[in-house]
Amino acid sequence: MYQFKFITNENDYLEFQKYYALNAPAFKKSLRNIRLMGPMMFSILFLVIAISDENINYKIGAFIFLALSSIVFYFICKPLFKKFLGSTIKRVKKDGKMPYGKDCFMQFYDDIFIDTSIGNDIEIITKSKYKNIEKIDANENAFYIFINAVEAFIIPFTAFESEAQRNEFCAFIENKIAK
């Protein structure tokens, strides 16, 4: 049996949102489409300039400017997307209703795991079977135990006493979902 008592914070939740947004197929597709819209708009603008103006130097200058603008737009989309997520979470925090439990206690038994979270003056106890786990993933800060496509339990790496315990837990949970 494994037991973890930890506190999740705004940064843990933000990291999960970034991780999810950059790895979920729907979000990846949306980000890709947004990144491609800029170059497409700049191309259309260039065609309008090319058709309407006879000055070749102006056309070359417009092409270079719009090509560079397209490249910059493509590369700044991802950081802007992350910044947008952060501002959204700050707005939710300002309203006082964070969508995660701050004080967490998780217990992992042979057949089930239990999450007890306290947040917004509400205690929520969730009992789940390992067969309900859709997938397990991690980034450099936490484990994410997905119970459906958009919901996951966050276990920050700070909840573990050592890297060895973290690796042991990872093997335990992977073994449970493999059955």
Image: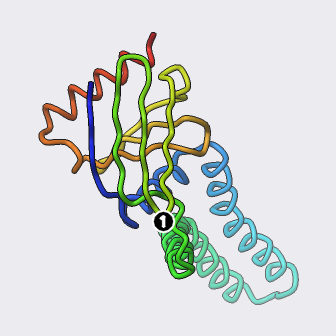
Residue topped by disc 1: 121
The residue at the far top in this view is 179
The residue at the far right in this view is 52
Q: Is residue 105 shown left or right of residue 112?
A: left
Please state which amino acid type lies under the numbered disc 1: Asp
Tell me the crowding category of disc 1: few under 14, some 14 to 19, or many 20 or more residues within 10 angstroms, Cα based: few
- What residue lies at 46% left-to-right and 51% top-to-bottom? 19
- What residue lies at 63% left-to-right and 62% top-to-bottom? 35
Residue 93, above or below 148: below
Residue 15 rendering spot, x and y as whole percentages: 41, 58
Q: Quadrant of residue 177?
A: top left
Q: Quadrant of residue 10?
A: bottom left
Residue 127, above or below 142: above
- What residue lies at 35% left-to-right and 23% top-to-bottom? 109
The front one of 72 and 174 is: 174
Q: Is residue 72 visible?
A: no
Q: Is residue 48 shown left or right of residue 6?
A: right
Residue 39 rendering spot, x and y as whole percentages: 67, 67
Image quadrant holding the C terminus, namely: top left
Residue 123 rendering spot, x and y as whole percentages: 48, 54
Residue 124 rendering spot, x and y as whole percentages: 50, 49
- What residue lies at 28% left-to-right and 22% top-to-bottom? 171
